[in-house]
Amino acid sequence: MWSEMWKKLNLFKSGENEILKMLGKHITISLHAMDSLIRMVSSEEDIIKFKNDIERYEKEGDKLAYKSSRLVIEGAISILAINNLLKVIDDTDMLLDKILYLARETYRIKELLNFKDKKIWIPVYENILHSNLIIRELSGLIDDAKENGMQPLLKKRDRIEELEEEGDEMKDRALNILYHMTGEIDDKTFILLRNYILTIDDLEDLCEDIANHLVLLKHIFEI
């Protein structure tokens, strides 16, 4: 009797897989948003359009996060994994929130402050491309969590960790360029750009956190 009860408590495969599907869809939306952000940074045209697109993607992500969290809270997954899954859902949704923040700041810095100096926008662009690469790796990791064993998952997690370390170096280079420009820009623009660069770094840290939690969940679920 107890073994059957334990089974019911810990093996809700359909619920777990449904949540992973939603997470995969959420990351796909984040990639669409990143594509729009890349265009905002690299182009002088359609900036408002791309910002509006990202705002729409963020709302889609909020709906997915709500549905995923509701499945978790309603008991569609193992009770051993609830906290970790809620953390993954929250961090995945935070990715889109940060992309939206970057989109709005891109608009403010480029359009409202009319700051378009390529000395800083080029390294910022490179940082964003790098973050986009990490999010793509994370998307593949979620696919492995659904379909493959632990080794492919660990390999992608290790790759994300390597990329995150590369991103730290890119962040430092961008910040060094920015600090060398202090005599050329006003304090307001400096602060906005510094926060902007640090937020790109936050994106990469979030991807690493999500990857680590997914590896842990793989152990719990044995998906």
Image (cartoon, helix red, strand yellow):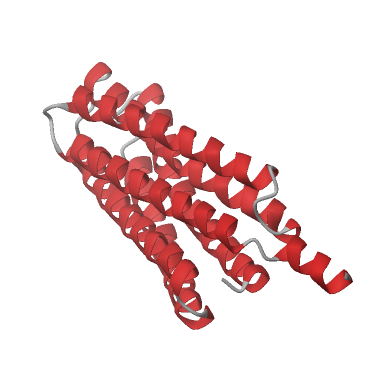
Q: Residue at x 82, y 65 (%)?
A: 5
Left or right for 3, reference 41: right
From the viewer's perspective, tell me whether residue 91 is left or right of residue 135. Answer: right
The x, y position of residue 198, in whole percent, is 45, 43
Q: Observer-nearest residue: 172 or 15? A: 15
Relative to the observer, which residue lies in front, 182 or 194? 194
Rendered position, 101 above or below 122: above
Residue 18, above or below 159: above
* Count of numbered tags: 0
Q: Is residue 205 visible?
A: no
Q: Position of residue 17 (x, y in %)?
A: 52, 59
Q: Residue furthest bottom?
A: 151
Q: Quadrant of residue 180?
A: top left
Q: Quadrant of residue 70?
A: top right
The structure residue drawn at horizontal position 64% and vertical position 73%, both measured from the top left corner, is 219
Q: What residue is drawn where x is 42% and y is 61%?
A: 138
Which quadrant of the figure contains the C terminus? bottom right
Task: Name the residue at 28% across, 44% down.
Answer: 32
Q: Nearer the viewer, residue 74 or 203?
A: 74
Horizontally, residue 92 falls left or right of residue 104, namely right
**Residue 124 makes an appearance in the image:** yes
